[in-house]
Amino acid sequence: MQISSLGFRTDIAILAAAGSTVTDCGTHLLVTTPDNPTYHWGNFMLLRRMPLPGGAREVMGAFDTWFATARHRAIGIDSPVEIDVTEFEAAGMTKDVSHVMTAERLVAPERPFTGGGIRPLTPDEWHMWVDLDLAVFAPDDRNNQRPFVEGKARQEQRLVAAGLGERWGVFVDGRLAASAGLYDTGDGVFRFQSVATHPRRQGQGIASTLLHRMAERAVARGARQLVMVADPTGPAISLYRRLGLETTEVAIELYQSLPGQIA
């Protein structure tokens, strides 16, 4: 199955390179991450197209068959433009539309941050990123718990070991103030991953300086396109636009939490 969506194409390239299994089932791709079962978007189905009318519940049933012990449903639609998914919503799923943003290189921030060191994480510093991610995202997302984030860290470390990129950090007074990953997904397309700034360090130009520094390193390595997937309603998207990233597509995700047993 050829993936038309740049967001899902880079997502799945990173997952596959980090150890997830991607199975082509013809009408959909099945992505599984056995060593991190609570990673919902590491254990999902990507549909080639919307099912025929009346087919949403059949797709959801197929998900339940593949992921018999999962307490979630996660289904992506391979479409670079927004489409009607009301049938899935009527069946209980929630639609999330992310913006897929791209640039050939990033614009330097007007006031770059100079109050700390900016560099790739060393092997003994990844636990600091886990703590940072939990501090930023766990308060608003009950699914963002330590086993899940530690699993993501293990996957990213495999990408680093394979020479596909690095996770960088901004260190202020010996503490990790911000972090982001940037990885080569093939053909000169580099994808940013998990950008986070500690709540007490936001608004200081740390993230923009970090992303620009990372992008310049990637361009020097042969990057021809930089990709960021962002929440269009979140506070970070304005920062990404100032750096020169522009929305070129959307990514459509359907999600449902499943407490208790699947009927």
Image: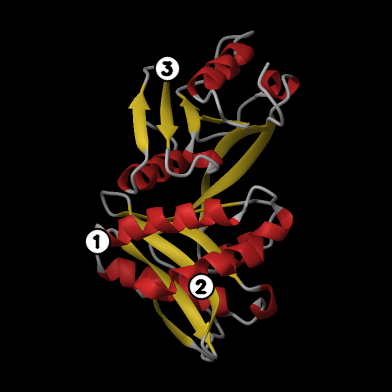
Which amino acid type corresponds to the residue marked 2 in the rendered image?
Met
Eye-nearest disc, 2 or 1? 2
In this view, 137 is above or below 84: below
Tell me the kind of residue under disc 3. Answer: Thr
Residue 95 image point, x, y percent? 67, 34
What color scheme is it?
secondary structure
Dividing the picture into quadrants, the one containing residue 172 is: bottom right
| Closer mark to the observer between disc 2 and disc 3 | 2
Q: Which residue is mark 2?
A: 128
The crowd level at tag 1 (other Cα within 10 Å; few <14, some 14-19, many 20+) is few
The disc label shown at residue 228, or none: none
Task: Tell me the SS state at disc 3.
Answer: loop
SS at circle 1 = loop
Between the residue at mark 2 and the residue at mark 1, the CA separation in whole angstroms equals 21 Å
In front: label 1 or label 3: 1
In the rendered image, the quadrant that contains the C terminus is: top right
Dot 1 amino acid type:
Gly
Q: Label 2, label 3: how many angstroms apart (C-alpha)?
A: 40 Å
Q: Secondary structure at mark 2?
A: helix
Which residue position is annotated with label 1? 163
Image coordinates of residue 158 in percent, x first then y, are 32, 56
Left or right: 90 as drawn, with respect to 113:
right
Is 258 left or right of 108, judged from the image as shown? right
> Which quadrant would residue 181 be assigned to in this image?
bottom left
- Point out the image quarter for the N terminus: top left
Horizontal side of 251 relative to 188 (left or right) equals right
Instruction: Check disc 3 and report the residue beneath it.
Output: 27
Q: Quadrant of residue 106?
A: bottom left
Instruction: Determine the CA span between mark 1 and mark 3.
Output: 32 Å
Dot 3 alpha-carbon crowd within 10 angstroms: few under 14, some 14 to 19, many 20 or more: few
